[in-house]
Amino acid sequence: MNRQIQISLPSTGEEEWQAAREPLMSGWLTQGPKVAAFEKAFGERHQVPHALAVTSCTTGLHLALVGLGIGPGDEVIVPAFTWVATANVVLYCGATPVFADVDPVTCNIDVADVRRRLTQCTRAVIVVHLFGLCADMDALRAALPAGVKIIEDAACAAGASFKGTPAGGLGDVAAFSFHPRKSITTGEGGMVTTRDPDLAGLMEKLRNHGAEISEEQRHKGPRPYLLPDFNLLGFNYRMTDLQGAVGLVQLGKLDRFIAERQQWAEFYRERLSALGWLRMPVFPETGNHAWQAFVTRVDPATAPMPRNELMERLQQRGIATRPGTHAVHILNYYRDRFGLAPDDYPGARDCDANTMAIPLHNRMSDEDYDYVVQSLNEIAA
């Protein structure tokens, strides 16, 4: 079988190549005018007044936590089923990650379990819009005491929305990813968004070593001998102008990319509905799914074979699949450090064991989608 269908491929080409030429020719390669233009356009698309480009969603989440003053003695609730970075950033700050279980149907955080995990030390909740499906923000907000901040891990959720409000403006601060497996990409890279001007100003300084003014401001100023003052311990989390130029082009394609993914998600739902053992992802009634991934659930009680064997069979046919993500509480580091067991979070445990992402991206052909459906039906026969 020569056919190879990747789980994901970035949709880039001549426009992105030409966009990257401008900073290469101008010589302004680090954060500069292209990043500023990308930030402005991203903020407008997601209806938030402040957007700051960073090196990754991980550094964006770290920046958000530091900007909120999270540190030793504080607890931050995170879902047990997510990419490990969601929990790692809490430890970067010296704070304690407190896991909450997830709903095995949506794979998003279980608000009832969040309520059970609250203590006097809870300072924030990192809510993940997993695979592009926004979490139930109304329920989460209602469950939290005043003063507990909501940080959106919107790594997968560029272009998603909840009840008409785009991701990125649903909590106090949010972080997005532009990794190549996301709908739009800058290679590596991320964006932090907020409605809070004071928090935005603080994070802007923190991402640039804590400098009081940006490099762009300094270079354009009338006194070249002046260096910025540093009143904060900051980081180098700046995006390059090469990435900003590519990101600006990609952002212009975001809505088309999501519309195409929505179409093919509906195709999968229709054509795979007869496989009762393969549960489809949730199609939201209260917002727009970004469809970063199409993540199914293999019912272990009724499936013709275990999920891992099914994934191996698909791989033999040239179809790449992946588990949705991992249950962080059963990863060795977290298991050993915090004394956790798989059954402590049964929803996350089951998602870890049973989710399966099948190919969905903007470089697949009609024939590719037909072949995925055909293969699943043949394997199940």
Image: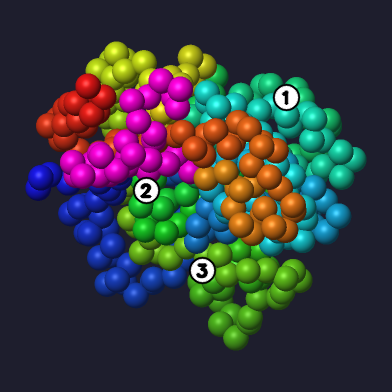
For discs 1 and 3, the disc positioned in front in the rendered view: 1
Q: Give me the residue at 29% from left, 13% from top.
A: 274
Where 194 sits versus 17, above or below? above
Instruction: Compare residues 101 and 172 and report the one nearer the observer.
Output: 101
Mark number for residue 216? 3
For discs 2 and 3, the disc positioned in front in the rendered view: 2
- Decide whether the magenta segment is chiefly helix, strand or loop: loop
Return the residue found at the far right. Answer: 120
Quarter of the image with the C terminus is top left
Disc 1 residue type? Ala
Disc 2 residue type? Arg
Residue 207 placement (x, y as % from top left): 61, 63
Q: Secondary structure at mark 1?
A: helix
* Mark 1, other Cα within 10 Å: few <14 / some 14–19 / many ≥20: some
Q: Give me the residue at 52% from left, 34% from top.
A: 351
Q: Earlier in the sequence, mark 2 or mark 1?
A: 1
Residue 86 placement (x, y as % from top left): 60, 49
* Mark 3, other Cα within 10 Å: few <14 / some 14–19 / many ≥20: few
Whether residue 120 appears in this view of the structure is yes
